[in-house]
Image: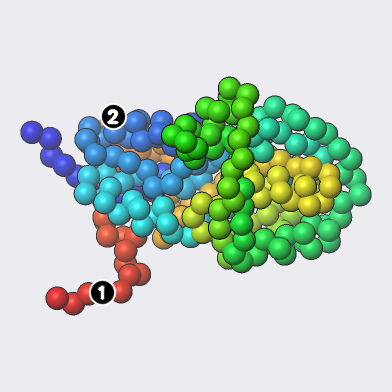
């Protein structure tokens, strides 16, 4: 009988891997039955991906709902159908007139709570069908805007036609849509060139581990020492004394 282990691995998702590929690899390496991730990252993105094992899968919903911090590289002058560098180019425009002050001013409207239209290339469902399946079939449907929240937003590097932005946001906020909308606001078009998640809930990239480290630890059967306890994401919750 399998000995079920409970805990959370804070993993750095490799580029070009899906979040589910990370889950499947860890499930195979650890020989555990219940494994799941807490917050999807696009294949072109890297950064922190909490992977819950055993009873820790019960706290996944709290991690998905927790604030996240990203560093995004936005490229001006080029629009794509997926709003990121993986998509097909749909339009190119002149962006040489855009200044850092223009970007700073344009970003102000996105601080706080606002409505955002999710991209067609997303895992959201419309009438039971994944939006990305419709997009791949060449169909575009109206997507109702969703209320999202950005807590902090700042430019960390200006190197036109690129700008690097650090974003702290709530659940459901698409950085790809933010990049696209920013390009629309400035009249030059834009897409998300790179994305790194620095933090999700209490898990920070500074103490996250790579897949190669996990693979080596599994060979030596020392991977359990890398686990955070199942209640780690809940330590800031108020206690209920019973």
- 28 displayed left or right of 182: left
Residue 112 in percent (x, y) is at 61, 66
Residue 28 numbered tag = 2
Q: Secondary structure at mark 2?
A: helix
When asked about the image quadrant of residue 80, the answer is top right
Task: Using a 10 Å C-alpha cutoff, classify the residue at mark 1 as few (fewer than 14 neighbours), some (14 to 19) or many (20 or more).
Answer: few
Q: Is residue 7 visible?
A: no
Q: Is residue 239 above or below residue 59?
A: below
Residue 20 numbered tag = none
Please report whichever mark, 1 or 2, sits nearer to the chain's N-terminal start: 2
Q: Quadrant of the C terminus?
A: bottom left
Task: Using a 10 Å C-alpha cutoff, classify the residue at mark 2 as few (fewer than 14 neighbours), some (14 to 19) or many (20 or more).
Answer: few
Q: What residue lies at 32% left-to-right and 35% top-to-bottom?
A: 26
Q: What residue lies at 79% left-to-right and 42% top-to-bottom?
A: 189
Q: Which residue corresponds to mark 1?
A: 239
Tell me whether circle 1 and circle 2 mark residues in contact (CB < 8 Å).
no
Residue 239 in percent (x, y) is at 26, 74
Closer to the camera in the image, 51 or 128: 128
Q: What residue lies at 21% left-to-right and 49% top-to-bottom?
A: 55
Select label 1 or label 2 by which is in front: 1
Residue 84 in percent (x, y) is at 66, 37
Residue 101 in percent (x, y) is at 83, 61
């Amino acid at each position: 009988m399998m000995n079920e282990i409970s805990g959370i691995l804070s993993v750095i998702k490799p580029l070009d891997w899906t979040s589910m590929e990370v889950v499947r690899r860890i499930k195979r390496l650890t020989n555990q039955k219940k494994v799941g991730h807490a917050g999807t990252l696009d294949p072109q993105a890297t950064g922190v991906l909490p992977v819950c094992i055993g009873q820790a899968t019960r706290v996944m919903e709290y991690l998905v709902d927790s604030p996240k911090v990203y560093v995004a590289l936005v490229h001006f002058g080029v629009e794509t159908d997926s709003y990121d560098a993986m998509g097909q180019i749909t339009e190119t425009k002149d962006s040489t007139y855009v200044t850092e002050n223009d970007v700073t001013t344009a970003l102000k409207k996105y601080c706080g709570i606002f409505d955002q239209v999710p991209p067609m290339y997303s895992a959201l469902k419309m009438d039971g069908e994944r939006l990305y399946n419709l997009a791949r079939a060449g169909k575009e449907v109206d997507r109702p805007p969703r209320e999202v929240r950005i807590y902090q937003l700042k430019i960390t590097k200006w190197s036109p036609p690129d700008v690097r932005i650090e974003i702290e946001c709530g659940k459901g906020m698409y950085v790809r849509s933010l990049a696209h909308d920013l390009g629309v606001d400035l009249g030059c078009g834009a897409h998300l060139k790179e994305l790194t998640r620095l933090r999700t809930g209490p898990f920070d990239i500074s103490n996250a581990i790579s897949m190669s480290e996990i693979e080596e630890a599994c060979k030596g059967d020392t991977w359990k020492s890398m686990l955070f306890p199942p209640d780690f994401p809940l330590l800031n919750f108020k206690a209920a004394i019973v």
